[in-house]
Image: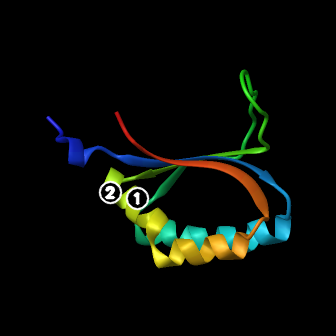
Amino acid sequence: MKKSNDKKGYWVAKANVNSPEKQQNYGKLAEAVLEKFKGKFLIRGGRQVTKEGEEYMRNVVVEFPSYKDAVDAYESKEYQDALKVLNGGAERLYAVVEGY
């Protein structure tokens, strides 16, 4: 049986992109963070139907080996630098979530 600290971690994000150029530059930096922390895209854009709540143009789910990895990746200097590059290029909802 897995211990609580062995549960996978996830980034769950919804975004409306205001600046495709900033989004693209951010994306390149963010992908390097995912590689470093062994993150894997499960959802990245694609077709969608919003059934409840506000419509967002992009949905992203990234899986990490552990919740700690997901938090550490988000809080890493590299990811914080990527966020500075994004700098208003998207309106986002973003959560780091422990798997079930």
Mark 1, other Cα within 10 Å: few <14 / some 14–19 / many ≥20: some
Give the amino acid type for the residue marked by disc 1 in the picture.
Val
Q: Quadrant of the C terminus?
A: top left
Q: Indicate which disc residue 94 carries.
A: none
Q: Residue at x 39, y 65 (%)?
A: 72
Q: Quadrant of the N terminus?
A: top left
Q: CA distance from mark 2 to mark 1?
A: 5 Å
Give the amino acid type for the residue marked by disc 2 in the picture.
Lys
Q: Residue at x 45, y 47 (%)?
A: 10
Residue 40 placement, left or right of 31: left
Q: Secondary structure at mark 1?
A: helix
Q: Secondary structure at mark 2?
A: helix
Residues at discs 2 and 1 in contact (Cβ within 8 Å):
yes
On the image, numbered disc 2 is attached to which residue? 68
Q: Indicate which disc residue 71 carries.
A: 1
In this rendering, the answer to whether 8 lies above or below 33 is above
Q: Residue at x 34, y 46 (%)?
A: 8
Residue 60 placement, left or right of 19: left
